[in-house]
Amino acid sequence: MGATLKDVAQRAGVSIKTVSNVIHDYPHIRQETRERVEAAIAELAYTPNQTARNLRSGRTGVITLALPDLALSYFAELAGAVIAAADDRGIAVQVEQTGGTREREIELLRAPRLRMTDGVLFSPLQMGQEDAAALDVGYPLVLLGERIFDGPADHVTMRNAAAARAATERLIDGGRERIAILGVHEGEVIGSAGLRLAGYREALASRGVPFDEALVAPSVMWHRRDGLIATRDLLARDVAFDALFALNDTLAFGALRALEEAGRRIPDDVAVIGFDNIDESAFSYPALTTVDPGRDWIAEQAVATLLARIEEPSAPAETRYADFRIVERETTTR
């Protein structure tokens, strides 16, 4: 007979629950305890029997990832990162696509099939703070994204306002004085667009640059075509600008095309910064300067947090924020 979870716990001098938390990579474990458990696992050559464990616990070894739109590269790459993080822990992932409508998002949360998996990672695009009660679903749930805060579920997200402020300040400190912002959702406060607009405005205020409504280029959707159309409109309005902050990378790719059509040199005439650091941003021409909001960290933490929630259903809900960085490339560097 191979070593059991109980054997590992006895060897490490901890509880069976602690061993389980280490195996599932629960983030809030002291490093000394983690090392002791890992040493016991190695000494005893312990291998978790996932099938037997699932049968005993009534679990499936499968989690659900619900995203708005896999046609948006950020969500496709996030899905890949979540699947890899789950696979490292012996967990499979079922992917659901909501289409980014409020009705579909709420309907999915109530769908009986979600209870056939062990828990759900959920990224809403249209649900808002007024829908927070809909997250009280009775199964393990971790919220992703920026639409709902202070809800009844764990939340893993990014620092949208701070990252947008840093991106805008980078442009100002590089000598840019007229910075257009592309992809704003009119009237939105909470959500990626609202928070990134807030960060943009904070940066202008911090550097003493006046806010100019003429530099705001709204766009309901955030695909390449939307960036192309919104930038063409900005140019058609004959608005003077020497930089452009796109609220995601795919909008920026559309903007690059529109600027090229108009004969604007990048970055000499117009510097461009995107947001998300999707893989394609390193290979666009010119290569896109962008904000890396910590997508891989978010994926790792989301999976670890969900597995910890599955183990401890009654623990208080927590919110975790990823760090960000500016990835400097050719669209801002002369």
Image: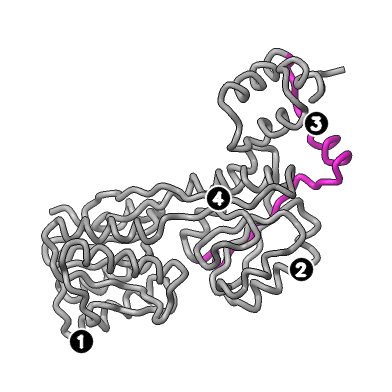
- Disc 4: which residue: 80
Residue type of the residue flagged with mark 1: Arg
Which residue extends farthest bottom? 237
Residue 208 in view of the camera: yes
In the rendered image, residue 54, in percent from the top left (x then y), is placed at: 83, 41
Name the quadrant of the N terminus: top right
At 17% from the left and 62% from the top, the residue drawn is 207
For the residue pair 54 and 160, the one nearer the viewer reads as 160
- Disc 3: which residue: 49
In the displayed structure, 234 sits above or below 65; it is below
- Magenta segment boundaries in residue numbering: 44-71
Instruction: Say which label, 3 or 1, has the lower sequence index.
Output: 3
For the residue pair 300 and 249, the one nearer the viewer reads as 300
In the rendered image, residue 181, in percent from the top left (x then y), is placed at: 28, 71
Q: Nearer the viewer, mark 3 or mark 4?
A: 3
Numbered label tally: 4
- Disc 2: which residue: 111
Residue 266 in view of the camera: no
Is disc 4 placed on a helix, strand or loop? helix
| 236 left or right, relative to 86 | left
